[in-house]
Image (spheres, rainbow, N blue to C red):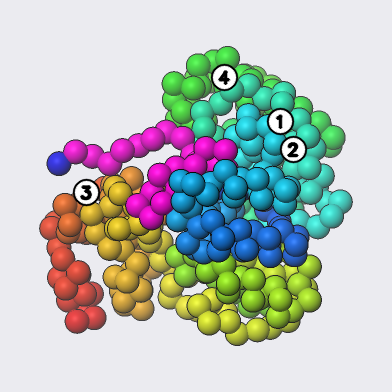
Amino acid sequence: MTGPMVRGWCPDAWHPMIAGDGLLMRVKPRLGRLTRAQVLGLCDAAIAHGNALIDITARANLQLRGVRDTGWQALLDRLLTLDLVDGDPVIEQRRNILVAPDWRVGDDSHRIAGALLTRLDELPDLPGKMGFVIDAGRACALHGEVGDFRIERDEKGGLILRADGHPGGVAVVAGQEVDALIALAHWFSASGGAEAGRMARHTVALPEWACGDILPAPSAARIAPGIHDLGWAYGLPFGRIEAPILAGVMEGSSAGGVRISPWRVLVVEGAPAMQVDGLITDPADPLLHVDACPGAPCCTQASVETRDLARRLAPHIAGRLHVSGCAKGCARPRAADVTLTGRDGLFDLSLNARAGGPAVHSALGPADLLAQFGTA
């Protein structure tokens, strides 16, 4: 058996990726927010040019699925009109910025991320999967999320610059945060970081000005389904929502916009409490503790169906469950308490491991797994 294909790049609106259900186009909402008009326009475009399925990624981006070969240029044009895509493909590719989703206008996260967006042309060429994290709220919200160059709140309330893979960072002067991020990105490029591919894998010692031991503040609780200061939060099973459902949420309320989180939860600004079929409103729902990629047949690299099995197993798993169609582990790059990795149409079962990790049982079918966890 040959291993899964690791492409080493991420799709965006200018560079769609072939999937089993058609082309996949990624949208990177600025500051992780869409206005009401953008949400409705995006939903209409997903229905007109794709299969109406929208995924939220771990970087708080959106992916439109099932886009037809003959329709992606028209979809791109609509996304450009909605101001959801940058007109310069190079800038769009660099626009990998994860922002704490509960920012308020004028606060540090909003200020720093907004300033970084205006200076992306100053960045060097970086590996396609690299990105920035702006986590400057009252407490750190994104400590466990992937990002190479980070601005974070420290334990005493100040701001630090931290390189991913290093436990501590250095204090940064207010107003100079973006200067520091750009300088760190240039150091990474000049010191041969492209060969490593990610900051956390780059073994060259940091320059003295970026090397420090100031720890980020403890992580705050993640946004969970239910009431939120900004409105109402919905969980998306496996990070997916149907465009008509999302459009219906907007049209059925006076919501002013939507915030996208990296936890497969979206916050509808100003919305009242509403039960919506297909969305999670119970913070105790077991599906919130499950990661599962689209699997077969949506992904050509998967040899197994993933999400129906994950849904059946979820109530019976203590801890985090990851069901991956192949060893790439796209839905969750980190270890989970229980990990199922598809291989040649069956599953390998691993504990406290990433996808493709050492298996305690191999070549299990769905019925075997259901029996293993007492659900049969």
Tell me where the magenta segment starts and ends, as one range.
Answer: 2-23
Residue occupied by mark 2 = 117
Query: How many angstroms separate mark 2 from mark 1 (CA)?
Result: 6 Å
Residue 78: numbered disc: none
Q: How far apart are marks 1 and 3 (CA)?
A: 41 Å
For discs 3 and 2, the disc positioned in front in the rendered view: 2
Decide: is 161 above or below 258: above
SS for callout 3? loop
Numbered circle sitting on residue 189: 4
For badge 2, the amino acid type reads Leu
Amino acid under label 1? Leu
Q: Do the residues bearing badges 2 and 4 touch, measured as CB atoms within 8 Å?
A: no
* Residue at the (28%, 41%) spot, across then down: 4
Residue that numbered label 1 is attached to: 120
Rate crowding at label 4 as few (under 14), some (14 to 19) or many (20 or more) other CA atoms within 10 Å.
some
Asked if the residue under mark 3 is in contact with the one under mark 1, i.e. CB atoms within 8 Å, the reply is no
**Residue visible at 53% across and 61% down in the picture:** 54
Of mark 1 and mark 4, the one earlier in the sequence is 1
